[in-house]
Image (cartoon, rainbow, N blue to C red):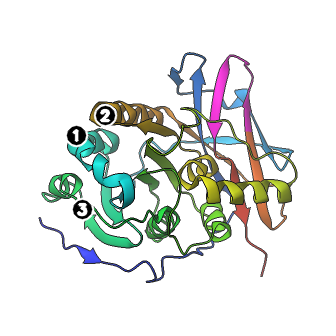
Amino acid sequence: MSSKAQSREADEDVSPLLRVDSAFVWVPVLVKTENGRALGGQDVSRFRLLDNGTPEKVTVLNTDGLPVSLVILMQTGGSASQFLSCYSNLPELIGHLVGDSGHEITLVTFDSRVEQIWHFPARSDGVNYALTHQHAGDNGAAIKDAVAFGVRQLQGEPGRFRRIVLLLSQGRDAGSSTSSQALLEQLGTSSTVVYSLTFTGEQTHAGRVRKTKHSGSSEEASERAIRALDDQAAEEAVSLTGGTDYPFDDRREFNSAMLETLSDFHDGITLGFQPSRHDAGFHRVEVRIDSHRLRVTARGAYWRAPSN
């Protein structure tokens, strides 16, 4: 079944906001040992979750049976052109990510604008070709525009999905019209998780498993998150939503990074809680586990819209 490619301009409503009810918050969590081995199936009693410093009662959500809605954001502009050949095994690797679950895949390419969008049903014949035959774009890298577009697409899907963005890009935004404040709010009101694979020619990567840096008061943490989106949009989008990010420089490293991402996706768990705090705006989320030998990566924040 072929899919029709549609050209889209970046100013064609790629900015937020989508408001969703934050009466119940989903918190993706990944637990790893000191040597990087992921541990799934943790007892909820081992976790302590804080919302703006307030302990909350959490439950483990069973997401294994949910279908997957995946948006792949592929940068083609700027320095991305030299890395497009790294994606030759991407169709097979994506197949391992979605597995036999019900799923749908959307591919979005971007340079200084969100350029083209392909929407594929499960087992489409066109997906392999589209993932491996992209051409270089202009000099831009509108990461914030692309992430905003992808999250809005996912949140518009009816029903219960595991909503995933896979971002293949450089780390720093170049050319977006979406503000960091708007993207912060959009990410904070969605149930989408961003996973990022960044080519590393432009900067030293911060590390494979990140600890949240959203400390301090809510206002301070919000300002820090906005500055981080300004400076390293890909990495901060991951931190805010609870995904993981890995660097790559060539095809071998890309394949290895994708396998790590697949492991993180399948070994992660999802906690949920109903906030006892009803303050509008930015909420810091901190997840701890009862062992200093384990490392936890989790959603760093959510955003509560003001009551009408």
Q: Secondary structure at mark 2?
A: helix
| Residue highlighted by disc 1 | 89
The residue lying at 70 percent from left, 57 percent from top is 227
The image quadrant where one finds the C terminus is bottom right
Q: Do residues under tags 1 and 2 come within 8 Å of each other at their CB atoms? A: yes
Residue 64, given in percent of the width and then of the height, sits at 44, 41
Q: Amino acid at mark 1?
A: Asn
Quarter-of-image position of residue 112: bottom left
306 shown above or below 210: below
| Residue highlighted by disc 3 | 121
298 shown above or below 24: above
Q: Amino acid at mark 2?
A: Asn
**Residue placed most toward the observer, 43 or 54:** 54
| Residue highlighted by disc 2 | 255
Residues shaded magenta: 287-298
The answer to whether residue 228 is left or right of residue 12 is: right
The residue lying at 51 percent from left, 20 percent from top is 37
Residue 185, given in percent of the width and then of the height, sits at 66, 67
Q: Main secondary structure of the magenta part?
A: strand
